[in-house]
Each structure stands twice: as C-alpha cells, then as structure tokens.
Amino acid sequence: MTRTEWARRPDREAPRRRPARRLLSLAAWLCLACPGGLPAATPEELFDAANGAYESADYDAAISAYEKILAYGLYDPRVHYNLGNAYFRKGRLGASILHYERALKIDPADSEARQNLDLARSQIRDRMAEPELQFPLLVVRDLVDGMSVNAITLLFFAFYIPTTALLGAIPLSADMVRRRVFAYGAAVLGISTLVVVAGLGYKIHDATSERAIVMEERVDVLAGPGEDNTVLYTVHEGTSLDVRNRREGWLQVSLPDAGAGWIPVSAAEQV
C-alpha cells in the first residue's frame, strides 16, 4: 500500500509507504552529487524509485534505495517509516521495528508509525508485560508519547507562568471572593504544571536512554563480555533492550524483567 491514502489496516498488514513531496533541502541534494559535480539522483528521485519498487512488491529494491538515502546521512522520518514497512513485508521484524522506532524518534507525533510499531511488536516472540496504568495516567502517557521534549517544555511554561501570576495576585487583591478564585485557579494550574513536569521527566528519560533492537533470530545474553561466559537468558529478533554499558565488540543490555547481561554488538542495532 502507499502512504498517500493510508488510513487504517483492515487486513492487519503494514500500511502503505509515504510519498515525498519535498524530501530534503537543496544542500542535502548537493550531497548526492557525483565527484564531477553532476548529481547522481535527487533525493526525490531516489525516494520515488524506492516507492515504485515497493508498489511493485520488489521489497529488496525498495530497501536498497531507502538505505542509499540514509547512507548519505539524510535522515527523514518518512524514509525510516517506509523502510520499516518494506522490512515488515519481508518478514524482517527486527529491522522493521528499528526503523519505526527511528521514525518516531525524529517525529514523535507520527501516529501511523506508532500503530505500525505496535503491530510489529505484537508479532515478536519476546513480549514484555507492560505495567498496568490507571485511566488518567494512561491518557497522560499516550499524550506525552506523541509530543516532543520541546513541545512539552512549551506546555510547561504555558501552565507555570499563569500559575505564578495567580499566586502573586492573591495577596494583592483586597476582595475575598477574587482571592479565592485566584487561589482555586492557581491550585488547578499548579497541579497541571506538576503533571506536565512528570511527563517532561518521563520524556527526557526516554529520549536520553539508549536502546537496541535485536536483529538476529536468536541471541544468548551472557554473564560477561565473552563467548565462554554463562548464558543467562535468550532473546529473539525484534526485542528491545536497554543498553547499559559497552566494551569492545560487546553491549551490556537488560530487560525490564531480567538482569543485565552481554551480547555481541553485531547482534543488535541501537535506535
């Protein structure tokens, strides 16, 4: 399917790829020039070629073209989104999840990429039980997931400034009714400010934490950085791991319900 008219997934397949209108800037386009100065292809041409291959079900060619764009350091959420779709069609869940995650890292408000990510995650072997949240907290988490750190910061100031203004106005008002209105308003806005602060903390932690996606069908997590160490547990393609440390050729990783262990760097790719 194409991203042009994508809405929902009645067949529970990955949605259509996203077309490019103006994929990248002129400066980025110049990066694709040949050594002689003549452009090999514009980003739009590469993107259109990849989309055409995708529509023809030539997913290998589509993947190759999308990867070529990324190889020049031109990062666009649409490219990662479409690349995730192409990998999904190929049954490569690890790569699909990786690129959906990268698309959301660039554009957290992309609800389509988030839906596709949930779909891909539902098909992996290692499914982590998420903590149950009550209705208000669940709504706050969903709202925060779809916002950038900058947007939440602006929301914080939108609540914080009027809160401090109302608090400052309370002792200056001689009218008791007005003082009560100011106090109630400051209380409501103050609680909202605290909620936003909590959401901002969650978002900053999520943005700064390092995660890696397992790319191989099966990977043993070892007690130490070496093949001769004890196997602690096994993870499978598509599983998201928290990265804690690095040594040459090895990553120390962990799961929410399991201890830390080590895997080869080649077994996973960082988001």
Image (cartoon, rainbow, N blue to C red):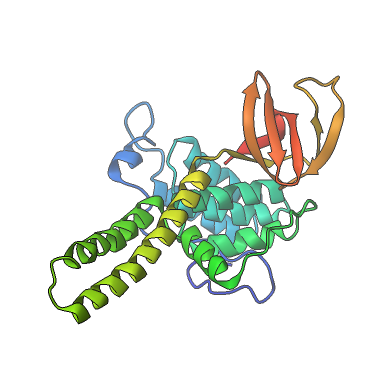
In the displayed structure, 175 sits above or below 169; it is below
Q: Is residue 214 above or below residue 78?
A: above
Number of numbered discs on residues: 0
Between 161 and 249, which is closer to the camera in this rendering? 161
Q: Is residue 174 visible?
A: yes
On the image, the x and y values in percent for residue 20 come to 42, 58
Q: Name the residue located 57 percent from the left edge and 53 percent from the top edge.
A: 100
Task: Indicate the quadrant containing the N terminus: top left, top right, bottom left or bottom right.
Answer: bottom right
> Horizontal and vertical percent for residue 230?
87, 26
At 47% from the left edge and 60% from the top edge, which residue is drawn?
Answer: 144
Q: Is residue 149 left or right of residue 212?
A: left
What residue is drawn where x is 36% and y is 34%? 33
Residue 185, located in which quarter of the rendered image?
Answer: bottom left
The one of 18 and 230 positioned closer to us in this rendering: 230
**Image quarter hosting the C terminus:** top right
Residue 47 visible somewhere in the drawing: no
- Residue 119 occupies quadrant: bottom right
Q: As rendered, which of 235 and 257 lies closer to the eye?
A: 257
Question: As rendered, which of 217 and 223 lies closer to the eye?
Answer: 223
Q: Is residue 169 left or right of residue 53?
A: left
What residue is drawn where x is 63% and y is 32%? 244
Q: In the rendered image, which quarter is residue 253 located in?
A: top right
Q: Position of residue 43 (x, y in %)?
A: 41, 46
Query: Horizontal and vertical percent for residue 129?
Result: 74, 57
Using residue 139 as the reference point, say whether residue 134 is left or right of it. right
